[in-house]
Image (spheres, rainbow, N blue to C red):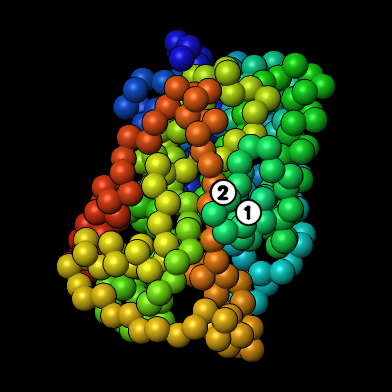
Amino acid sequence: MAGSPGKVFVTGANGFIGRAFCAQLRRTGVSFVGAVRASSAEDASPELVALGDFAAVEWEPLLAGVDVVVHLAGRAHLPLGAADAVTPYVVGNVHVTRRIAEAAVRAGVRRIVFASSVKVYGDASPPGRPFGPGDVPAPHGVYGRSKAEGESTLRTICGENGVGAAVLRLPLVYGPGVRGNFRALLKAVANERRLPLAGIRNRRSLIYLGNAVSAFEAALHSTELDGQTLPVADAETVSTSELVYRLARELRVRTRFFRVPASLLRGASTLVGRRADALRLLGSLEVDARRFRELAHWAPPHSLDEGLAATAAWWRMRDAL
């Protein structure tokens, strides 16, 4: 582990991971600038700069004197009904990444740490065999393909110009303030909805927000990760039914399962156009994160149960307001 990383530039500084990561940099006294598209009262901070559309930003002047860029910004979701639109993902995950990397080279930035996704591997891992660093990317959806192209673009530009590049592939991130699919599941469990998940024996890798922040902090300091593209995750994987059971325990509510054959669930979800949601619930998407831990000299500081407890506590407090 090296000493101070120097001046850090964080994109997506008011995102789910970005806000928590910048708070950690502040706590540890690391000099940083956080780039956001638009600021709000919640994000009022002298370190944050609102830049508008990232695709139109002139990045080079902003990166003058910066040692490390942590590129967390990207396009992960689109409005309902536009999930298959290619252009926003390409702009957000490829075009912006290319412009930041090229500007970083011109500005003399030493290293870039890039937040990618396990979706680059595909939507489902083979039973009993987690994806690992040596697996060939095989993304299915437009999001996964755009992240894979963003990774490739970054590696090419950095490799040709002597800039260190570390790519962290993240699974689903959960924690206080979570949104998206995990939040929908959390709400269903909290409301004691009956869920057709009895007997589901899949394996899913997740990462708690606090562990994700810790992993990026480790990557910030570890030059051993330069040139590496590695999955990062909590130490423990979990089935969807076990995840629901543990969430219910932390929320202090009943678990209400019923059994429907997985094949029937998949078929029904296809008929109603929700196949992707079914795959996330029923399929496995597991990664082997040991290589990242070895090179970064890192271990997840929080267990799965600790992460779920913090998430459930946030949800209960939110409901009490």
Residue 195 lies, with reference to residue 14, above or below; the image says below
Separation of marks 2 and 1 at Cα, in angstroms: 13 Å
- On the rendered image, what quadrant is the C terminus found in? bottom left
The tag on residue 130 is: 2
Q: Earlier in the sequence, mark 2 or mark 1?
A: 1
Residue 320 in picture, x, y percent from top left: 18, 67
Residue 157 in picture, x, y percent from top left: 79, 28
Of the residues shown, which amino acid type is indicated by label 1? Lys
Residue 40 lies, with reference to residue 217, above or below; the image says below
Q: Residues within 10 Å of mark 2 (few under 14, many from 20)?
A: some
Residue with the most extreme front position: 128
Of the residues shown, which amino acid type is indicated by label 2? Pro
Of residues 31 and 171, which is closer to you in this image? 171
Of residues 247 and 27, which is closer to you in this image? 247
Residue 205 visible here: yes
The residue to which callout 1 is attached is 119
Point 69% across, 16% down: residue:
108
Q: Is residue 59 left or right of residue 188?
A: right
Residue 40 in picture, x, y percent from top left: 43, 50
Q: Is residue 203 left or right of residue 76?
A: left
Point 62% across, 65% down: residue:
78
